Image (spheres, rainbow, N blue to C red):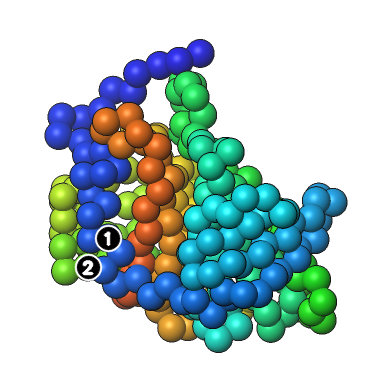
């Protein structure tokens, strides 16, 4: 089933707010250039990433595709790539060398919109880094962010507030920027990588866009990427990154917590 979404007047498309939202992003690194990383995932699949240079990666021996890598910590990488053969998808792997663990996030733009569902879906698969000692807990869904409230300053012209409502949803509003005055409640997922390290993703209802973020809550930094459809109907990837300003946390009574 396909459907048109009834959006409020003046509601912005992905490309309307994307410009400059990577201003406060941690810079891309070329430290992985010339290396190869093999991963084994809990669903039985494997992936080998051969990093040819700063922005070229071969996936499982295929032709070189675009990628970017960001070192959030010395031992923690956000690796984002696209594949020409799969233009409606975007891939992120979080590599935590200290524990030998990884998490793969795949975002997929559906060809048609379905009533009541975001058009961009996401899957999550934990795994391990071949050749590294594996320690600590397997990346898994977490409730750690529920009740937290924070500001995310992506640039002088991009300031958003997030409220983490439950294990399934979060609320956002734009305080400064093209979307000022806009806000919504969207689908969200949170996975814990390590202490104070989280993958947070959201999938919007009103526009076809999803985002994958890696939070370093100790350093109060986020890095991430968007996948969505522009106002011109083109599929686009774009990056983002912010300084996190915590505003507090709500504690719920025992037995009456959100889902």
Residue extending farthest top: 1
Q: Quadrant of residue 233?
A: top left
Q: Is residue 56 above or below residue 123?
A: below
| Residue 172 visible from this viewpoint | yes
Left or right, 208 with respect to 18, comes to right
Residue 177, position as x, y percentages in the image: 16, 56
Between 134 and 190, the residue placed more toward the observer is: 134
Residue count near mark 1 (Cα–Cα under 10 Å), binned few <14, some 14–19, many ≥20: many
- For label 1, the residue is 21
Residue 244, position as x, y percentages in the image: 35, 73
Residue 77, position as x, y percentages in the image: 56, 73
| Residue 251 visible from this viewpoint | no
Q: Is residue 60 above or below residue 74?
A: above
Q: Residue at x 43, y 56 (%)?
A: 225
CB under 8 Å between discs 2 and 1 = yes
Residue count near mark 2 (Cα–Cα under 10 Å), binned few <14, some 14–19, many ≥20: some
Q: Assign a secondary structure to mark 2.
A: strand
Q: Residue at x 74, y 76 (%)?
A: 100
Q: Is residue 183 above or below residue 36?
A: above
- For label 2, the residue is 155
Between 56 and 227, the residue placed more toward the observer is: 56
Residue 176, position as x, y percentages in the image: 16, 59
- Which is nearer the N-term, disc 2 or disc 1? 1
Q: Assign a secondary structure to mark 1.
A: loop
Q: Is residue 227 above or below residue 64?
A: above
């Amino acid at each position: 089933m396909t459907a048109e979404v009834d959006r409020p007047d003046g509601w912005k498309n992905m490309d309307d707010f994307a410009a400059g939202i990577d201003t406060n992003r941690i810079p891309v690194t070329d430290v992985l250039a010339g290396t190869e990383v093999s991963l084994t995932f809990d669903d039985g699949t494997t992936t080998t990433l051969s990093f040819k240079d700063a922005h070229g990666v071969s996936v499982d021996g295929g032709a070189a595709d675009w990628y970017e890598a960001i070192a959030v910590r010395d031992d923690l990488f956000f690796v984002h790539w696209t594949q020409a053969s799969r233009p409606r998808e975007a891939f992120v792997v979080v590599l935590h060398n200290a524990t030998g663990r990884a998490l793969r996030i795949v975002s997929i733009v559906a060809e048609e919109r379905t009533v009541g569902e975001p058009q961009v879906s996401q899957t999550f698969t934990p795994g391990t880094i071949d050749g590294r000692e594996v320690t600590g807990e397997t990346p898994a869904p977490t409730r750690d962010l529920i009740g937290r409230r924070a500001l995310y300053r992506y640039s002088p012209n991009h300031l958003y507030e997030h409220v983490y409502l439950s294990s399934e949803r979060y609320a956002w509003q734009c305080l400064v920027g093209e979307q000022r005055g806009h806000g919504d409640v969207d689908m969200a997922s949170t996975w814990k990588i390590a202490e104070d390290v989280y993958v947070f993703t959201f999938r919007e209802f009103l526009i076809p866009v999803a985002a994958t973020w890696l939070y370093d809550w100790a350093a109060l930094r986020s890095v991430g990427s968007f996948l969505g459809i522009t106002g011109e109907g083109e599929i686009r990837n774009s990056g983002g990154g912010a300084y996190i300003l915590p505003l507090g946390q709500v504690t719920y009574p025992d037995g009456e917590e959100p889902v």
